[in-house]
């Protein structure tokens, strides 16, 4: 499988202050572009809203964290919030999809912290980037999977546990803490957030399925059958 790209709480106020975008997650926009399922299965979602914007999704490149083969025919770009219970619900589903399609589908993880609902989400997003920068793609996914596993349905990360998760992912804890305290990746998290909104995201999780020149919005935590209904025609 090909993957990519003590004082933790201190960084929360710093990162949050730099990421506040007033009212960004509650707007709606009528469109006739492809969409799947009911957008209500997520936080802040408006069913079918913003879908004409999906072509604004940033192209996948070497800076992205990718689970699965980089040569896959189909890419799922997910904009996610670590504190969102619906994101916790869809996280294992997307892993299952990539595993079951065995090289034909990959999954790109990007950040969409809804700070009005989850004030610590930018801090945790920055922490995932710190781990990835220090340990690589495998470490990023190990850490991020642990965050979602521990937050679970409650959607609440214990910031004091993040250094332990980082150590389990194989990175130097002191370097990790410094990176988090410095809010080193706040700009990258903000850029993901802005691209999510520009691409039609109104809540989390918000995903875009890409195959060639086709882009299909999949808002909310959809069941695996809905994902397959989108993916299978793209592989025919």
Image: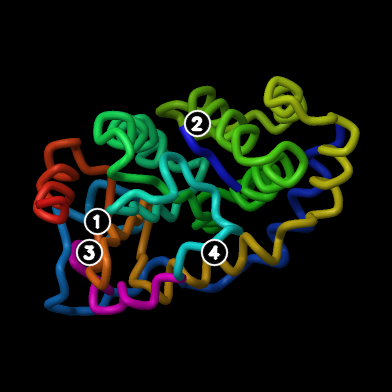
In the image, the segment drawn in magenta is 46-58
The image shows residue 116, relative to residue 80, as above or below, that is: below
Q: Report the number of numbered marks.
A: 4
Res 216 label: 3
User: Which mark is first along the chain, 4 or 1?
Assistant: 4
On the image, the x and y values in percent for residue 30 come to: 18, 79
On the image, the x and y values in percent for residue 216 come to: 22, 64
Residue that numbered label 1 is attached to: 218
On the image, the x and y values in percent for residue 14 come to: 79, 58
Mark whose residue sits in front, 3 or 1? 3
Foreground of the two, 79 or 49: 79
Label 2 – label 4 distance at C-alpha: 19 Å
User: Which mark is first along the chain, 2 or 3?
Assistant: 2
Label 1 – label 4 distance at C-alpha: 17 Å
Q: Secondary structure at mark 2?
A: helix
Residue that numbered label 4 is attached to: 192
The image shows residue 2, relative to residue 233, as above or below, that is: above
Most distant residue in the front direction: 71
User: Which mark is first along the chain, 3 or 4?
Assistant: 4
Res 41 label: none
Foreground of the two, 217 or 98: 98
At 35% from the left and 58% from the top, the residue drawn is 44
Label 3 – label 1 distance at C-alpha: 6 Å
Foreground of the two, 73 or 161: 73
Label 4 – label 3 distance at C-alpha: 18 Å
User: Which mark is first along the chain, 2 or 1?
Assistant: 2
| The quarter of the displayed image where residue 159 is located | top right
Residue that numbered label 2 is attached to: 148
Q: Secondary structure at mark 4?
A: helix
Foreground of the two, 28 or 1: 1
């Amino acid at each position: 499988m090909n993957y990519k790209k003590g004082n933790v709480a201190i960084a929360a106020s710093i990162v949050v202050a730099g990421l506040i975008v007033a009212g960004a997650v509650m707007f709606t926009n009528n469109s006739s572009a492809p969409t799947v399922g009911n957008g209500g299965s997520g936080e802040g979602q408006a069913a079918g809203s913003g879908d004409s914007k999906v072509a604004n999704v940033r192209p996948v490149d070497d800076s992205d964290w990718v689970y699965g083969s980089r040569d896959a025919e189909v890419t799922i770009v997910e904009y996610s919030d670590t504190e969102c219970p619906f994101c916790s619900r869809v996280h294992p589903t997307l892993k299952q999809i990539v595993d079951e399609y065995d090289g034909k589908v990959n999954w790109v993880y990007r950040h969409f912290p809804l700070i009005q609902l989850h004030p610590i989400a930018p801090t945790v997003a920055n922490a995932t980037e710190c781990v990835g920068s220090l340990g690589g793609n495998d470490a990023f996914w190990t850490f991020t999977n642990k965050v979602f596993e521990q937050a679970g349905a409650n959607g609440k990360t214990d910031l004091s546990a993040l250094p332990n998760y980082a150590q389990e992912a194989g990175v130097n804890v002191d370097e990790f803490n410094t990176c988090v305290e410095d809010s080193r990746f706040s700009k990258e998290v903000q850029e993901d957030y802005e691209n999510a909104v520009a691409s039609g995201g109104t809540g989390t999780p918000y995903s875009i399925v890409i195959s060639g020149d086709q882009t299909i919005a999949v808002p909310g935590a959809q069941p695996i059958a809905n994902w397959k209904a989108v993916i299978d025609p793209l592989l025919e």
